[in-house]
Image (tube, coloured by chain):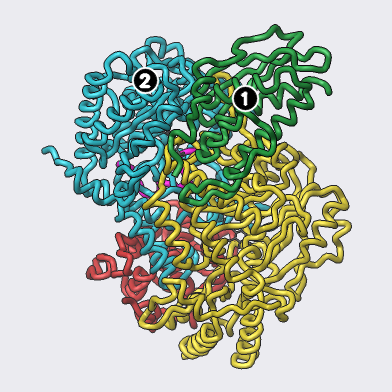
Chain colours: A red, B yellow, C cyan, D green
């Protein structure tokens, strides 16, 4: 049985209370994409500035729950300074961590829950507990899906 | 004559309410999303499958006759339950959503064209918005909105102007977010006065109050089985027979035809015309059991019980949580149902409902399929606690305790 | 490796098959209309309602998560069961009929216009006829027919000419009247060769044979839960993801949106886009239990059992009833399923099935929602006996005995 | 529990084997209407000739089961020689006899089943047993509903 502490790790609450890289960037030169969680109405904007083939700045706008906000905040610190290709790699690893496999009716943890960290996701690992709460996965991935969209607008 | 509802006895009828969540007894406060089911309904489903399961309207053998009779008995019971003049005015659908789509496709695409106006309230559920927006996108029908005031009531101050040129008014009898109970009879009268029809989305009304479509004097009513102690997979459209008789079919397939040749088909009479393919037979029969269950308790008793409990909730919440808590919508029990949309401090509804879940308290977090209304409230989401016949004061107390606990958790 | 089906053990799983009718044990031979349900499916329904009943995709609380997971698990199981490449290609509907209507409305009204041609077989069920005739009446789409030969097979001799200008071929994988099993893979190839898509109505196939939509290489497949040991109220559409992704929504309402504003709505991703309103949650979960049940027995074993039993039926019927009996459709088990449409002397099928009912034998009398095919057969109706995994030789014997008795009754 | 003998009374089988007034009439001067039983595919044509305000001839065409055929045959003998108004009265009485009220799941007979014959339906009374077989009611009423249609084409 998953408890609150699996979901609300300290680092998550910290990013929620003190979100990193909040705000906007001027578009253009930056790019922006907007994501919705159609289930709960959360929305998020991801602003991305790529300079010399590197993510030189990223900003997060919008509203959401602690999970979507902290996940986006962590995401912003994880990808800033990376190339778009590297960011896509992190994105892929994160989404893989979030992918649910067969959950039993009794909410057992999925196999991915026990796997060691193959990807060096670092702090983002704290979000692993979200897979025990399938409904919240959409919260955790909202920012990332929006990053995916905005990355689609940049080359390389 | 007030009937009294024995809530302990009622609660004992619902198997799910005996379960525990995270080691605590469940406190189910999400009946606006879907209600729990009494064992009487589950018994009816099992009896159907174990004794008379057969496809209907087509078999001459015994169990097929029994199944057919059981489905038609359900139709008759539903007609009585909502005060429909004719049994054939009851059309089964898979949910309220399909029922509204049926009207939008069949009546709407026959009667509405570019420039025609549909008037909705700004507190409608997406089920009563999107089908009309589809019609708008497809053929230039205009969608207009009755605004919602700060008090959570519909604002009729500009109604005359809004009604100008309107062909259909489509409103909810009870809001699934605010609990508001708009004056349906009066709205129908206003609609008819300008020659418009009126569709009432009674999904949040029929489970909680006595319903009389004849007294409402409206033209279409929809509601959904799973919110009224019935199974999933069945909804109901009631329509005035002269309207239904003039409407073309919506879904095409078996049972809705009078004849099919290589050249085309002739539709069947109403209501078969609108019931294509194998119906949700078990579900229709289960819904009949739900209606019997509700009738045995009495819809007046249910309404009175919920009113008392809502009053208790409004009072307890405000006493114990004070200004930390906002309750959206009307603040007196006289003009609201037991659906309470809450904002507690600045805790996001999703997080709130997650902490409440640790207490076994089930409330819904989200936009409740009413995004336009959310923009009026100025929020993305609310946490919604909704009461039904099986809830008691202890449930309300558990909600308040859990809210206090959530406040502490996120204040850390 | 042939798995053997233990029919006595299977029969014991089905509560309804233990009942009596008119003092005789029931002999259920109407599975083409709807199948009986094993207790495993009823148990799953009860477990859902008693333990995790909650609306899905919207609640953060525990039982809502469990219900959501259970529904998505069912989707994944169905995808595997029919060989779908992607789980998101499985769309839930209320029955096969709605699934076809979904394609006709969403894909059809986007892609077909006046002069475009839809090619059907002349042995289709009304579910796969009327939606296309509606499209024909609405926008001048032309409906063309693959004829049926005297042998009960589709007649492809003129196929090249028939395919000219065709945009969609829509055929059944198994006829619900004749038991015919048309060569789907070959038909799909012919359709694709002229740039047409192919929709397969597998309502009478999926319950009885291993299904592989990838091997068929077709574009849409529909089937219906209640004919495959599942509950009423749920059907399935499988569609190629590139097609589904390009299709607009059909029914509008909750859950199928990405956003709704006063100005309009944006649809959600596939498959949510096509699943408006509260889904048949219990039914989807019950269908999963049915899939597990069928998989545990093995679809090959079921197919082999039915083939053996059909051979036995064909032989016994002709031995004992001789020329008094006509069996419509293919007369060898290699190219037919266990659906036997019968004509016995000049006794009207309705009367025949009435007398059979006195023996506890359930067969269907009527046009079986295939009126165009009836005109080809030159009859208004047939009496149809259809076999499934729980039938045995004693059931076939009971049918023959009852037919003999009916002959005597009406010969008086 | 209803048995076969409730349904297939001797007089019904007699009308089935020896249908009265089978055939066609020339249209015009006669009127004709066609009825379908959408559930089983049965179809029936009712030809009606009204002379001097009286049904001077009636003929039945089409195919159907013993119940629909015998019911139509009995109907033809019941209304020939009547005025259209009188025929409508018989029609009303017959449909009333056929109307099902609440049947329990166990197929109990409906109240109308026990009622004495108020209408003087005569031979048609033999069809009363059909109400115990709700699916067959559509068979029994097919000819009558078609008569209703064709009566709609005549005056008076
Ligand atoms: C071949 C075929 N297609 C479609 C259907 C329609 O299925 P449903 O009535 O469940 O929509 C049926 C069964 O009635 C059928 O036999
Ligand atoms: C007011 C209102 N209308 C319509 C609906 C749609 O009902 P369903 O999802 O059963 O179609 C709901 C519930 O979701 C509702 O609350």
**Does residue A154 appear in this view?**
no
Residue C276: percent from left, percent from top: 54, 52
State which quadrant residue A25 falls in: bottom right
Looking at the rendering, the stretch of residues picked out in magenta corresponds to C83-97
State which quadrant residue B319 falls in: bottom right
Foreground pick, D138 / D131: D131
Residue lying furthest left: C1
Q: What residue is pinned by disc 2? A: C344
Question: Residue at 22% across / 37% down in the picture?
Answer: C392
Question: Residue at 83% across / 23% down in the picture?
Answer: D156
Q: Are marks 1 and 2 in contact (CB under 8 Å)?
A: no
Measured along the vertical axis of the image, is residue B37 above or below residue B95? below
Q: CA distance from mark 1 to mark 2?
A: 25 Å
Q: What residue is pinned by disc 1? A: D143
Q: Cβ of disc 2 within 8 Å of ligand 1?
A: no
Q: Is residue B31 magenta?
A: no
Residue B195: percent from left, percent from top: 85, 47
**Does residue D127 appear in this view?**
yes
User: With C383 as the anchor, is B89 left or right in this view?
Assistant: right
Foreground pick, B43 / B188: B43
């Amino acid at each position: 049985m998953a408890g609150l502490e699996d979901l609300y790790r300290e680092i998550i609450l910290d990013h929620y209370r003190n979100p990193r890289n909040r705000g906007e960037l001027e578009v253009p030169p930056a790019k922006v994409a907007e994501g919705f969680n159609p289930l709960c109405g959360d929305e998020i904007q991801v602003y991305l500035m790529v300079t010399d083939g590197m993510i030189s700045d990223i900003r997060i706008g919008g509203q959401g729950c602690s999970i979507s906000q902290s996940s986006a905040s962590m995401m912003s610190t994880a990808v800033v300074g990376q190339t778009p290709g590297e960011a896509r790699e992190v994105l892929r690893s994160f989404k893989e961590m979030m992918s649910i496999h067969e959950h039993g009716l009794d909410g057992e943890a999925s196999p991915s829950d026990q796997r060691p960290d193959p990807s060096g996701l670092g702090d983002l690992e704290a979000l692993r507990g979200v897979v025990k709460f399938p409904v919240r996965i959409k919260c955790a991935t909202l920012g990332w899906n929006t990053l995916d969209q905005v990355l689609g607008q940049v080359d390389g | 004559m007030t009937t009294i509802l024995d809530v302990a006895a009622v609660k004992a009828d619902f198997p799910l309410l005996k379960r525990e969540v995270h080691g605590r007894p469940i406190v189910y406060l999400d009946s606006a999303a879907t209600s729990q089911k009494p064992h009487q309904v589950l018994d009816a489903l099992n009896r159907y499958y174990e004794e008379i399961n057969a496809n209907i309207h087509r078999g001459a053998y015994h169990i097929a006759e029994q199944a057919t009779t059981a489905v038609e008995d359900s139709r008759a019971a539903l007609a009585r339950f909502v005060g429909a003049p004719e049994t054939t005015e009851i059309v089964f659908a898979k949910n309220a959503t399909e029922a509204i789509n049926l009207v939008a496709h069949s009546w709407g695409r026959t009667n509405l064209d570019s420039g025609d106006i549909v008037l909705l309230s700004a507190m409608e559920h997406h089920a009563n918005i999107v089908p009309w927006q589809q019609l708008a996108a497809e053929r230039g029908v205009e969608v207009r909105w009755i605004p919602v005031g700060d008090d959570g009531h519909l604002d009729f101050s500009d109604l005359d102007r809004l009604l100008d040129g309107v062909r259909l008014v489509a409103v909810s009898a009870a809001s699934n977010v605010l609990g508001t109970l708009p004056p349906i009879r009066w709205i129908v009268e206003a609609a008819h006065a300008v020659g418009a029809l009126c569709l009432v989305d009674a999904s949040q009304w029929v489970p909680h109050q006595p319903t009389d479509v004849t007294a409402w004097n409206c033209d279409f009513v929809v509601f959904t089985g799973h919110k009224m102690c019935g199974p999933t997979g069945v909804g109901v459209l009631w329509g005035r027979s002269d309207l239904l008789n003039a409407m073309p079919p919506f879904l095409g397939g078996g049972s809705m035809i009078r004849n099919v040749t290589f050249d085309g088909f002739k539709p069947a009479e109403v209501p078969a015309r609108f019931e294509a393919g194998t119906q949700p037979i078990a579900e229709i029969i289960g819904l009949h059991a739900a209606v019997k269950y509700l009738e045995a308790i009495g819809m007046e008793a249910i309404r009175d019980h919920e009113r008392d409990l809502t009053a208790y909730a409004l009072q307890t919440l405000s006493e114990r949580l004070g200004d930390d808590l906002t309750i959206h919508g009307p603040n007196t029990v006289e003009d609201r149902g037991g659906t309470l949309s809450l904002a507690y401090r600045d805790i996001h509804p999703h997080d709130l409902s997650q902490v409440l879940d640790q207490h076994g308290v089930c409330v819904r977090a989200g936009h409740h399929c009413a995004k336009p209304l959310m923009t009026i409230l100025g929020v993305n989401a609310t946490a919604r606690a909704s009461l039904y016949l099986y809830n008691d004061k202890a449930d309300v107390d558990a909600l308040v305790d859990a809210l206090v606990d959530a406040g502490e958790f996120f204040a850390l």
